[in-house]
Amino acid sequence: ALSSPTDSGGRTKLIRHLSKACIDDGFVSKSFVAALSNGPIWTKGWTADESKKMTMEVFGDWPLPKSWSRNVKRAGDLPSRVDMRRTRVQPEDWHVTRTEAEGLSQKR
């Protein structure tokens, strides 16, 4: 899932590669935008801040160019700015060890 801090470089490279491919091929859809901007987050590594930063890097200016979604056929699948909204706010720290999780909960 490339969620830990040690995966940061690989995660960023993968997201940039997939985003470029979707943009170049005209397949930027509502679900693609939502997956990047509202996917699972963790307290370390892929955090809400990292997700927002990467989302803004890829989709910062709205409206997006129509060419980015030229091959999305259903109107309901076309992305809009509202698809960038984060509603998942709780970290899913299933990959954090019990000791780390206890330390994180004490810091909050």
Image (cartoon, rainbow, N blue to C red):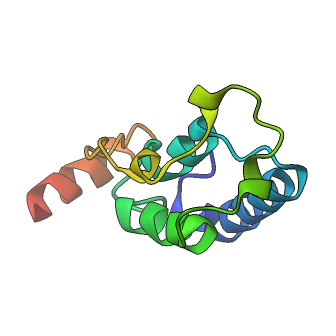
Residue drawn at point x = 50 percent, y = 48 percent: 80
Image location (x, y in percent) of residue 75 = 63, 30
Image location (x, y in percent) of residue 96 = 40, 47
- Describe residue 57's horizontal placement relative to residue 91 as left or right: right
Query: In front: 44, or 59?
Result: 59
Query: In front: 6, or 35?
Result: 35
**Measured along the vertical axis of the image, is residue 105 above or below residue 57?**
above
Q: How many marks?
A: 0
Image location (x, y in percent) of residue 77 = 62, 31
Residue drawn at point x = 71 percent, y = 47 percent: 28
Residue drawn at point x = 21 percent, y = 57 percent: 104
- Describe residue 105's horizontal placement relative to residue 68 as left or right: left
- Describe residue 88's horizontal placement relative to residue 13 as left or right: left
Image quadrant where one finds the N terminus: top right
**Measured along the vertical axis of the image, is residue 82 above or below residue 5?**
above
Q: Quadrant of residue 106?
A: bottom left
Q: Quadrant of residue 52?
A: bottom left
Q: Quadrant of residue 93?
A: top left
Residue drawn at point x = 40 percent, y = 60 percent: 47
Query: In front: 99, or 26?
Result: 26
Which residue in the rendered view is the most extreme toward the right? 25
